[in-house]
Amino acid sequence: MISTFDPTVYASTPTVNVLDNRGLTVREIAFHRANAGDNTDIRITHHQYDSRGNRSQSRDPRLYDLMQTDNTVQPNFHWQYDLIGTVLRTISADAGCTVTLRDIETRPALSINATGVTQTWQYEDNVLPGRLLSISEQSADEKVPRVIERFIWAGHSLAQKNLNLAGQYIRHYDTAGLNQRSSLSLTSTLLSQSLQLLKDDQIPDWCGDNKSLWQSKLENEIYITENTADATGAPLTQIDAKGNKQRLAYNVTGQLEGLWLTLQGQPEQVIIRSLSYSAAGQKIDEEHGNGVVTQYTYEPENQRLIHIITQRTKKHPFKEKLLQDLLYEYDPVGNRVSIFNQAKSAHFWRNQKVVPKNTYRYDSLYQLIQSTGHEMANIGQQNNQMPTPLIPLPSDDKIYTKYIRTYSYDLGNNLTKIQHNAPASRNIYTTEITVSNRSNRAVLSQSALTPENVDAQFDAGGYQLALQKGQNLSWNQRGELQQVTTISRNNSTADKEWYRYSANAMRVLKVNEQQTSNSTQQQRVVYLPGLELRTTKSGTKTTENLQVITIGKAGHAQVRALLWEKINPGDTARDQIRYSYDNLIGSSVLELDAKSRIISREEYYPYGGTAIWTARNQIEADYKTIRYSGKERDKTGLYYYRYRYYQPWIGRWLSADPAGTVDGLNLYQMVRNNPIRYQDESGTNAHDKAQAAFKEGKKIAINQLKTASSFLKNSKNNESALEIYKIFFGSHQEVDQLPQWKKRIDNVMHGLDKLKTTKHINYQKDKSGSSSTVADLDVEEYEKRSERKNAYVNVYSDALKRVYEDPLLGSEHVAHIAIHELSHGVLHTQDHKYIGVLSHPGSHDLTDLLSILMPPANEQDKTEKQRRATGSRKALENADSFTLSVRYLYYTAQDPNFLLSLRKEYQEFSHKRVDRLIVTPPKWTKAQSG
């Protein structure tokens, strides 16, 4: 394939950090170039600090330039801190001013957000564990606060202990209703839970102690979900609120290898027949219950996915058929520059050759500036309405035409213009976006709209007030979209869509109401674990009851089972399994039924608009809800991402990022202006493979910690365990140290289990000056993790991906990094020495790591005994010593022969027969012998 990558665009465009005499970054200098041959323009981000070294102000290049001629322009961010360095007040140009006060335990006590909502936290008395009891809210126009969350905690009865509930909350009254927890596993996996929704006409307020009054606010129906899990906490079965059962199976490394579904009253059916993986943990091939096989090919040098084939094989009853054949091409840093679907053929449309290929071009800041592809010839300008699908499925690709899109950005990384050009079909238009001259707030350009009055289109907290004229947006006190007015009427009821959320920002209810000539048409969706309940009413008459069983990620597909309880449409069967095959950012591009026949195809413009939309019939087309980036598209045209809603027609979020500056100073920017490479799972953090890699590594790490702890628990293993302990921590160690070792392992395991890969991690560019640093944990933030929602681990995405994609490191070494970093927070370990993994690929070089046990003589430690004692102490506080000792316990528990091999290599090294101690883990031993 001919590449669109031109290396001269990136020549002489480094990122430069300027440090002050305290080592603090005061300027970040970037060099921007869009096209080869252009001069670079310098973009400088400015930071200021207070006397204690806390960052107090930040300005992006755009606002800094504006400030040179207008001193009323405020910085993007202004922070104020208390005496221990905790943020008291944040003033954001995008999100307004927020104030948070904490108690003596540094727990949040009171906050006031930009819209004037006051929130207070109430805790147990000091003589008790200090657990959270309730949260109250009061808006500026409310006379008294409302209790919008209340926690009821379990006691320590025998019955509660048997259900692992002692010390846990068992009832949580929140903004959606009542969530009850009836049983937990030993690893705190939720085994039984129920949900009772708040009545539609009720406002959440759980004040006082009148439980019967609380109950009167709730619907009668209780939705119960039951789960089982294995010893590591991995789910084995789930029975949803309607009795549908999902069953999962894993291989010996904890990777998914099979999944089955039993619809209520029906026999079990296979969803995932098989999944196989490479030694690096990458999927190689998968077979689904519809007989479709998907195969994956990776670049040997970096493990980037370069080829996906989805097909029916020769043994399939509907005969062999190539359904999708995608070739991916990358530039040297991992940006995708082309996607070629070899399952389609080139054709001519009005004398223009149309190739089934998408190409992408980037500027020196890796922002997407041009894309090419193909679209339906009659599609028209993109807006918040879905295009009309082509029905039935076309027999060939001759109805598609070629397009070119170019994207423009300002100095603050705001997308300001999308130019669309499909000359053969005369589909030529420009979408312009007007940005405020005081912030990064922006809306679709309109006549008479200027940068000076854009801020009036938002409230004080940065929440957009209308999609377009007549389509007003309402927000609740927590900054969640509460209602969209889809059609306004002067003298009658408006059409609208409204929502309700749980305390963790998960949407639990969506209601769409449309006025007809003589009644109200209502479509209602209740979101439950693994299940959506969709009900349609015309007036008071129920016209449809539909269960949608959400099976989630089945390899590279999402699977949804549609089960009609009442009135299934047309000649559709009572139940239908729909396999949705995704692209690399999770967008649903191909839908197949249980017999592998095509239901629909959809392709997207880079920022999420639909370019091609075909289906075999209109009824099935109407039931597709999961689209771009694997998210649900509402009738409003907005995509729901949990914490935020996304406008694909202008490539912007509807509100400022609640996670703050994790993706930079621009709180409205979508996935760093690189939607081909990055995706955002929850509306708070752009990532590509980094988050998935760390999540997989975390799972492996917890399994290793748990297995090591179990191995130590059995006294029969004391001799083997002590041998490993002596290697890492000193030959003088005794068996009475093993219980303390187990306790340290358990503590790190519990700490890692509580780490959330979306909430507690900042995914960033590689650390300046060090491409080998993969992650680091902020101990101070970790200590305050229960009171503050801030991230406490920095993960450097490109460095992590290099580890993950290295076939001789892979997810095993990501697990090593996870244990290593959590040990800093939990055990206060230090970084004295590291293992070597690069000098002997596929093996561990322990030479430098073990040298810590015999430090050189000094004034304090002159004798060998003193030096050994110091070395042992340093080894016990060394992060990599702890991490590798855990892994070697795990390997020994899995395969006793590993300890025999380790013993042999260690004896050779300790007797100075070899210069270096090189150990090959079992995984690579088997891979090499194979």
Image (cartoon, rainbow, N blue to C red):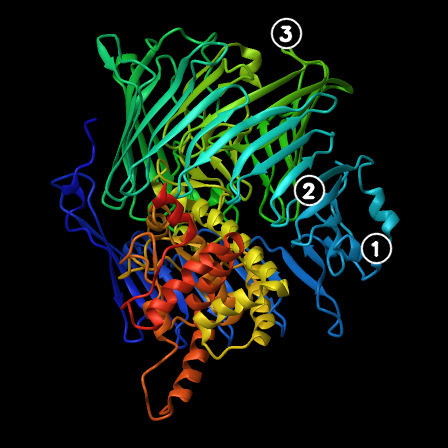
Q: Is residue 915 above or below residue 216?
A: below
Distance, label 2 to label 1, CA atoms, is 19 Å
Q: Quadrant of the N terminus?
A: top left
- The residue type indicated by label 1 comes to Ala
Residue 165 visible, this angle: yes
Tag 2: amino acid: Thr
First of labels 3, 1 by sequence position: 1
Using the image as rendered, state which of residue 654 and residue 22 is in the foreground: 22
| Residue 435, quarter of the rendered image | top left
Rendered position, 459 above or below 45: above
Q: Position of residue 554 (x, y in %)?
A: 52, 31
The location of residue 673, given as percent across then percent down, is 35, 41
For marks 3 and 2, the one nearer the N-term is: 2
- Image coordinates of residue 784 in percent, x first then y, are 56, 67
**C-alpha gap between disc 3 and disc 2:** 37 Å
Residue tagged 2: 228
**Residue occupied by mark 1:** 159
Nearer the observer: mark 3 or 2; the answer is 2
- Check disc 3 and give the amino acid type: Asp
Q: CA distance from mark 3 to mark 1?
A: 51 Å
